[in-house]
Image (cartoon, rainbow, N blue to C red):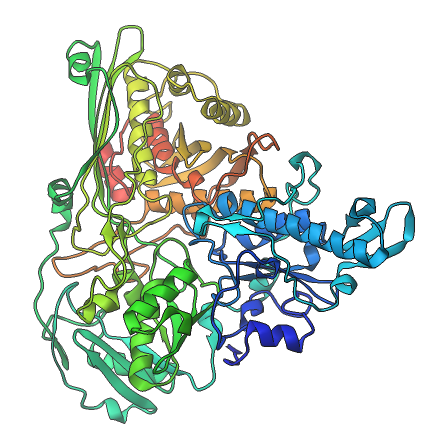
Amino acid sequence: MNSISPTLSRRSVLKASSGLVIAFSLFAPGEAAAALPPTPDGVPPDAAKLYAWLAVHPDDTATLFTGKVEVGTGAETALAQIAAEELDFPIDRMGVVMGTTSLTVNQGPTYGSMTIRYAGPQIRHAAAAGRQALLDLAAAHFKVKADRLVAKDGRISVQGDAHRAISYGRLVDGKRLDMTIGAAGKGFGMKVAPNARVKNPATYTVVGKSVMRKDIPAKITGAYTYIQDVKVPGMLHGRVVRPYGVRSTLISVDDGGLKDIPGFVRLVRRDNFLGVVAETEWGAIQAAEKLGSVLHAKGPAAGPVKWSDWQGLPAMDAIWHTVRETAGTDTTVAKTGSVDTALHGAAKVLKATYRTPFQMHASIGPSCAIAEVGKDRATFWSSTQMPHEARHDMAKLLGIPADRIELNWFEGSGAYGRNGFDHVNADAALMSQAVGKPVRVQWMRWDENGWEPKGPPIVQDLAGAVDAHGNVTAWRHHMWIPTTSDTELIAAELIGKPRIVGSVGRGSPAITYAYHFPNADVTSHGEGRVGLLTAWLRSPAQFETTFAMEAFIDELAAASGQDPLALRLKHLTDKRAVDVLQAAAKAYGWQARPPRGKPASGDGNAPLHGRGIAWANRDDVRVATIVDVTVDPASGAIRVTRAVVAHDCGLVVNPDGLKNQIEGNVIQSISRTLHEEVTFDHSRVTSLDWIGYPILRFEEVPDRIDIVLVNNSPEYPSYGAGEPSTCPTAAVISNAVYDATGVRLRQTPFRPNRVKAAMT
């Protein structure tokens, strides 16, 4: 673990190093934030000042400061490319400081595939303003007009006189870039340096090129500093003892025997919150085990901790009814013509119900945070995806002004969506507040699986009609979904203040109407809780709604004897959607035919082969996927052998980084489709380990994932690519399985026993 000094500030680091804040030639990736610990002044920099975004150092390195964070998507490198492009600076000498609240501007949380789309232009304009500021400094230095100067690779020279040149580092000479560049608005909507002259994308030399990610070498060698690796002087270790049932209340605690554990410090009880603190992590683990962890507890009254009985969860097979009956609001997405009339007189009418279960983020590294809470000041070390927002949340929880709270950001080993990282901040805060020292809390595997917020179960009913000419004449798509944005903190609820931080709400319906049919009814229902904490999971709800939409369009193609690609193209007017479908088909070698709906040939024990196609539009990104699958009729096991993905997110900043992200999305969404389902009884989650919640194994990864980038052109802006390639996967596998076997799979996950049962 890295030992972190807790007393340096941005100002003191700049002063002590003559402007050198971070350079990756001096610090390993991940140590950037470690070198810039909590600050006494704690106030984020002024977004209207150039120093808030950039620093240039005497050794001819530079630093980009951004409120966005890295969650494995390559955002750190892509944002550095954008800055280096506009600054005319070598990308390999551009370091990045991310997330730490006193060092970075609040650009909004890092989620929803919105980093490049919204933070990219902010950084582009700031860097362009920086380039102009440096040209102005050089003009004064050389006593010439700025339009006679040329900036390239971190140097400025006078046109026609190569001997008159100066590096950025010498020009700045360790000073802070205190120029005013202007900024208005906040978060995603902030406009930075509105008068800066940015480059014509047609002239880019850094953006659009495959650049090695800055974080990968240290991650490969093990030198990278994740939040789980951080330690601070005087740090103690904590563990939380969770209620037996989701909303059980704490009746009593017998702490006898805890003092016999070497290094045990204190039992922390506050209302229904129960934690233990020890000098060592092993001591904290032992203390939590002695009190009875969720993994081993036999009932609400088992062991030295007594909890009230709570039986508030429905049976697993009743969850679909519960979701339908959950009170909430209705949102109409599309309404045209009369679906009932069209269904009544159609040549072919189909109806189907699709179900998707609770799923979890299943982060490989359990959530972790460190908090040091004093009387009127607090410092956090955290991997939250929303550092500036978390700072304000902790201010509310602790009753300390936000400007006296510092959050130092480190990447988490397993971090995306709203998993447990914000909740563990609160756990550490309450324990540190109780003992008056910094406390590190790392969840155990059963904490993570049992208590991290889940992607919600969703039920969808579809009906469609096809006329005698093969035209879809009616389309009804209704979904029932509980809340997907339940952001109240677990610890706050346990201490009786559930609404002091966060809220409960559905967010957007995440159901789309992408085709054009004469009669359509697309509606989302529901909003309330269904027992477990729920939150955003990659491509929130659209992974599930694309499953239903794109599997059902295939059902209509099969029922009317049409090629599924041709049917889609017949009812699409979105050119970018058509482009990705055609690009995927060309790369795959698609031959037009209807879905077979039965084994192509062979005996009853031979592997069955099929193909499927699906597409999605998420946040202006179009993605089309085609897969080949093999189904073992004896076991029901499905294996995806090849995937072809055509991806249009506009201008691509780092093609290799994008392809890595697409591959990761495909692999993870295959796992969600084939394996992942949260199990629970009437009290709590029961899938508390990797046996109960299996994920895709290495041998199950497709042999080939072919990627085609579509509309990667300066004519298009850069859209977000973190999530969209997740969306088509469940649908495309379902379609391919039907092509191979004639069996329609309408409930995920497609585990072998479920497939085998459907085939017999």
Residue 405, quarter of the rendered image: bottom left
Foreground residue among 192 and 448: 192
The quadrant where residue 324 appears: top left
Q: Is residue 572 visible?
A: yes
Residue in the foreground of this view, choosing between 172 and 29: 172
* Residue 266 versus residue 367 in the image, above or below: below
Residue toward you, 524 or 48: 48
Rendered location of residue 62, percent (x, y) = 67, 61
Viewer-proximal residue, 760 or 30? 30
The location of residue 484, given as percent across then percent down, is 27, 48
Query: Which percent across, then down, holds residue 644?
Result: 49, 33
Relative placement, left or right, of 568 versus 341 is: right
Residue 243 placed where, x, y %?
Answer: 18, 70
In the rendered view, would you say 445 is above or below 348?
A: below
Residue 57 shown left or right of residue 69 in the figure: right
Q: Residue at x 63, y 69 (%)?
A: 21
Q: Would residue 244 be found to the left or right of residue 671 on screen?
A: left
Q: Is residue 323 left or right of residue 505?
A: left
Q: Quadrant of the C terminus?
A: top left
**Which residue is at a point 39% across and 43% down the rendered structure image?**
670
Q: Is any part of residue 223 visible from this angle?
A: no
